[in-house]
Image (tube, coloured by chain):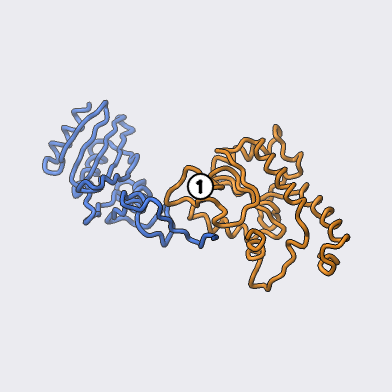
Chain colours: A orange, B blue
Amino acid sequence: MGLETVFGHSYLTTRLDEAVNWGRKYSFFNYPFVTACCGMEFMSAWASTYDIARFGAEYPRFSPRQADVLFVVGTVNEKLAPVLKRVYDQMCEPKWVVSFGVCATSGGFYDNYATVQGIDKIIPVDIYIPGCPPRPEAILDALVKLQEKVSKESVLDRKATGSAATGPMALKADRYK
Amino acid sequence: MTGYLLETLRSKFPEEVLETHSFRGDDTVLLKKEALLKTAAFLKDELGFDFLMDLTAVDYLPREPRFELVCHFYSSKHNYRLRLKCPVQETEASVASLTPLWSAANWFEREAYDMYGINFTGHPDLRRILMYEGFEGHPLRKDYPLKKRQPRIPHRD
């Protein structure tokens, strides 16, 4: 990002981390990848009663290129899996993924020929929300947990290290080994 | 009413109708699959059945003939309902398409083909409707392996 790439974890870098992370965690632009009934609770969490805007994450972007957090809301089947992967690949770093509800997390009760048994088979996931569907409180809790996670990150984590061939996917995959 | 429909079909197609029964107002006719198209045409043209409500199949493995094609018809003119069922063997799983009579049959038959592997002769565009291209087998057949997965992209780990 700048000096920190030269000095590593120096005083300057750690303070920069704090400033950058503070900005990032209170201004998530989310991409709602809504496929199923969990979408109702998603809407509820975003609407006035629960009002996720209090946490700075109310702004949905329907272009993955402008989004920070990918919310995978609902069942993902094998037919849809390449689409999800593509949406994820189109998002710019830094990016995070929230698996919303049991279907996205593990396939839920759809243990059959068509359903992906958890979206982490396709893309890396930062936060899993249990529930069928999750209550809005659980969603807010997940968002706070994601904010805590983001606040512990360093800008160095996402410094591009490999050649162009490794790409954003490879970078992300390294972080989750 | 109940007796009338079944009696009409029995007398019109004595060779083709295998069995009829009626349960709490649901009339069912079991007939040879070769007679499906002409029976359906008779229902539509003579008895006023203007609506193909559903067309699907059932796998009765290990029974032989293994499959049963099930069609539900409705007459909005007379408020009649009728169910036609045709036994279909696995070795010659091929039935005449109902698309010339009801275009609603198009997607129903594609689904039956996709899920059970039953072919519909005369269908204008018989390809999978729910599963993706490159999917092998027919997932609602009872002998499709329960845990078999056919991912389109490689899974992580």
| Whole-percent x, y for residue B39 in the image | 21, 43
Quadrant of the image containing the C terminus of chain A: bottom right
Q: Nearer the viewer, residue B76 or B66?
A: B66
Amino acid type of the residue tagged 1 in the rendering: Gly
- Residue visible at 75% across and 55% down in the picture: A153
Residue A160 place in picture, x, y as percent: 72, 67
Measured as percent of width and height from the top left, residue A18 is found at 83, 53
Q: Residue at label 1?
A: A107
Who's the residue at 39% across and 56% down the image? B128
Q: Is residue B50 left or right of residue A161?
A: left
**Near-viewer residue (A70 or B9):** A70
State whether residue B141 appears in this view: yes
The answer to which of B4 and A147 lies nearer the viewer is A147
Q: Quadrant of residue A49?
A: top right
Is residue B37 shown to the viewer in this render?
no
Snapshot quadrant of residue A89: bottom right
Under circle 1, the secondary element is: loop
| Relative image position of residue A173 (x, y in whole percent) | 63, 62
Q: Label 1 lies in what chain?
A: A
Q: Quadrant of the N terminus of chain A?
A: bottom right
Outermost residue to the right: A11
